[in-house]
Image: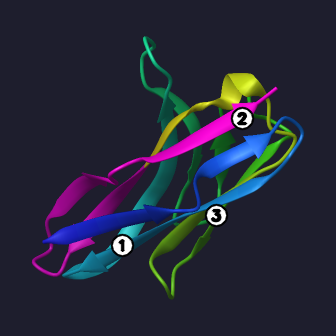
Amino acid sequence: QVQLVESGGGLVQAGGSLRLSCAASGSIFSIEGMGWYRQAPGKQRELVATITSGGNTNYGDSVKGRFTISRDNTRNTAYLQMNSLKPEDTAVYYCNFEVQLSSGSFNRRWGQGTQVTVSS
């Protein structure tokens, strides 16, 4: 079994910063793609950022230039540095990893979600 545990959410004023972390544990051989998604009340889940095993990144249009995704492969952890936060960034943030298990099979796993609230 593989588990993803997120941390770092909270309440911040507009213009502030937060750093989210997502750590994977379990029978992991390797982790391919890592990503962050978010879902605001009444809206569909949307892409925030992804990073490949080779370090290539991709961002949603609404966060480009403000958010930075990174990864630490030695810790099986992804990070999302969020700067210049806006009230419209308020959402539950989820991490999603494509994990290769020790058995050789691939699985996608979601974290439990962490709330980010930006006050105006």
Above or below 29: residue 24 = above
Amino acid marked by disc 1: Ala
In front: mark 3 or mark 2?
Answer: 2
Compute the Cα span from label 1 to label 2: 27 Å
Q: State which region is magenta.
A: 95-120
- Could you tell which of marks 3 and 1 lies nearer the N-terminus? 1
Does the magenta run of residues contain 6?
no
- Residue 61 visible at all: no
Residue placed under numbered mark 2 in the picture: 118
- Residue 83 visible at all: yes
Residue 65 % position (x, y): 86, 39
> Looking at the rendered structure, which numbered label has been put on residue 24?
1
Who's the residue at 73% across and 55% down the image? 18
Q: Residue furthest top?
A: 42
Compute the Cα span from label 3 to label 2: 29 Å
Amino acid marked by disc 2: Val
Q: Please indicate whether residue 20 sits to the left or right of residue 25 in the image.
A: right
Amino acid marked by disc 3: Gly
Front in this rendered view, residue 58 or 111: 111
